[in-house]
Each structure stands twice: as structure tokens, then as C-alpha cells.
Image (tube, rainbow, N blue to C red):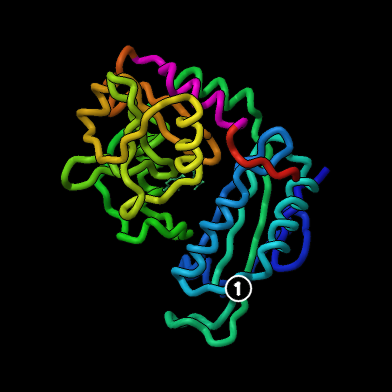
Amino acid sequence: MPRIAYVNGRYVRHADAVVHVEDRGYQFADGVYEVCEVARGFIVDMTRHLDRLNRSLGELDIAWPMSRKALETVMREVVRRNRVMNGMVYLQVTRGVAPRDHVFPVAARPAVVITAKRIDPAVVHKRAEGGLKVITVPENRWDRVDIKSIGLLPNVLAKQKAKVAGAHEAWFIDPDGTVKEGASTNAWIVTMEGKLVTRPADHGILRGITRTTLFDVAGKLGLEIEERGFTVAEAKAAREAFITAATTVVMPIVEIDGESVANGHPGSVAMSLRQAFFDVAEKTRA
Ligand code: PDD
């Protein structure tokens, strides 16, 4: 069965899916995106993801490419046509196709691409059980990382640096020494007292949907959350550290810049949050 992508109004074979050379996403990274987890045949937290899409589009003054309801239908259809039970659905909206010129085109229609991909949950679970390693890199992104823009070059470079170092994620560090977030994940620690700590999301990081839902999960498990910055030294000395994102949900961190976090094994708090996540999150049948 061939993979299917949705491109500007048509369902096409993934291998044949193309956009115009003057799509502003291609030339200027002038667009936004969302990634939703698909788990057990459900799209997870679709409402929150589309709320954030609405905000990202609004901040860049890009119109919705179609009604929200229609977009939801297409997302479900792409997941269904690709028979994804577990994996992800990717959605990208750009300002559209127009002769190359930095200023906004007058007539361009927003362009939309939606793809879906299967991910083996057993492989992801195995990674969680092993725990992940992170490296740290200086923050070098623009100050509107609250917008889920497709302009991800610093994130790409940071992630590659992590890979070359034998790690899985890179944490951006502020000049004041505090952890911002990962190249594609939010960052958390668990204090010795069992409190969850994560940086406030009002500016300087992306307000992750997994992060937001984890507040609900923590509430269910009776865990307290403190929103404040934390340093790399504090993370290394913490009881646990972990990261969150739609593609990985909760992933324990066992090493930071080559130094073990706690005993170097995934922590029980992260694993129980991971376990409870699906039950608490919103589930939309694909
Ligand atoms: N990344 N921070 C950054 C910079 C991200 O790119 C992401 C998501 C997150 C976590 O957000 P959420 O919980 O909504 O997935 C935080 C996606 C998964 C990606 O780029 O593939």
C-alpha cells in the first residue's frame, strides 16, 4: 500500500507529493507546522494542537488554508489512508506561492501539506526504557520561538551536534545558565522532593502541547509542578530529568553532557507520567 500525502487539495502518492519552487515555505521558511501523536488509532490532543496552529498563523498573519473543521477531516483522512495506528501526523501551512519578494504577496493562497507516518510503539518504548542522552548548546535562536515556525535551522544544527556526540537531544542554554528547551522537545526535571520543574512558557520556548497536557497528568498523579528556570548543574544533580514532545511523549534523560543524571537510569516519575499520559490526553478517532 503506497503512502499518501495531502497537498493543496489533493491526496497524492507520498513519493509524488511536490510543492511549487516558489512556495514561500521553501524560499523563506514562511510558514508554520504542527505534529500530533497518533496512538492506538487516535489523534492525540488535536484540539490543543489546532488551537496552537491558530495562534501561530495569527502571529504571522497567515490565513487558515481551509476551515478548521475541514482541516480536522483531512488530518483524520490522511491518518486513515496511511493506516497509521501508532505514529504521527504532520501538518504544514505556508503563506503560499508567489514570485520571490520578502514582503507579503497580495494574492497568494496559503498552501497546506499533511503527511502521516507509522512509528513502532515497541521501538519508542524501548528507547524510553533505556533513557536518552542530551548535550547542551548556547541559545542562538530568534526570540519568537513561541511561534511553531518551520524556520528550524538552529534546531537542525543542534540536533546534528547531539547526534555526532552520541546523544539524542540538545538543550538550548540561556546566557544566564538556565535550560530553555530541546531542539524539538520541552525540558523538565524532578527535584529530590519529587516536584516537577519546567520553565515558564510565556516567552523563550515553545508552549508544548505535551507539556500542557502533562500538567493535567501530574494533577491526576498528585504531583506538584513548579514553573521556573533551572540550571544545567541543577538538572545534573536532580532526582530525574526528562523531555516531552508529541512524537516521544515523556522520555527520561539519563545523561547530560556525558554526566549521569542521578543513578543513570530512567526515573520512576518520568515513567509513570509516560504510562498515564494516553488516558488523560484528548483522543480523536482517526
Ligand atoms: N517538536 N519545543 C520545540 C522547539 C519543539 O519543536 C517541540 C515539538 C516541542 C514540544 O512540543 P509538543 O509537545 O507540542 O510536541 C518543544 C515537534 C514534535 C517536531 O518538531 O517534530
Q: Position of residue 144 (x, y in %)?
A: 35, 61
Residue 153 to residue 178: above or below? below
Dominant SS in magenta: helix
Tell me which segment is drawn in magenta: 264-279
Residue at the location (30% across, 60% down)? 143
**Residue identifier under label 1:** 110
Q: Between residue 215 and residue 41, name the one nearer to us.
A: 215
Residue 127 to residue 201: above or below? above
Determine the image quadrant of residue 276.
top right
Q: Residues within 10 Å of mark 1 (few under 14, many from 20)?
A: some
Give the SS element for disc 1: loop
Side of 232 where 241 appears, left or right: right
Q: Between residue 102 and residue 254, name the one nearer to us.
A: 254
Classify the position of the N terminus by image quarter: top right
Side of 195 where 70 appears, left or right: right
Magenta-span inclusion, residue 274: yes
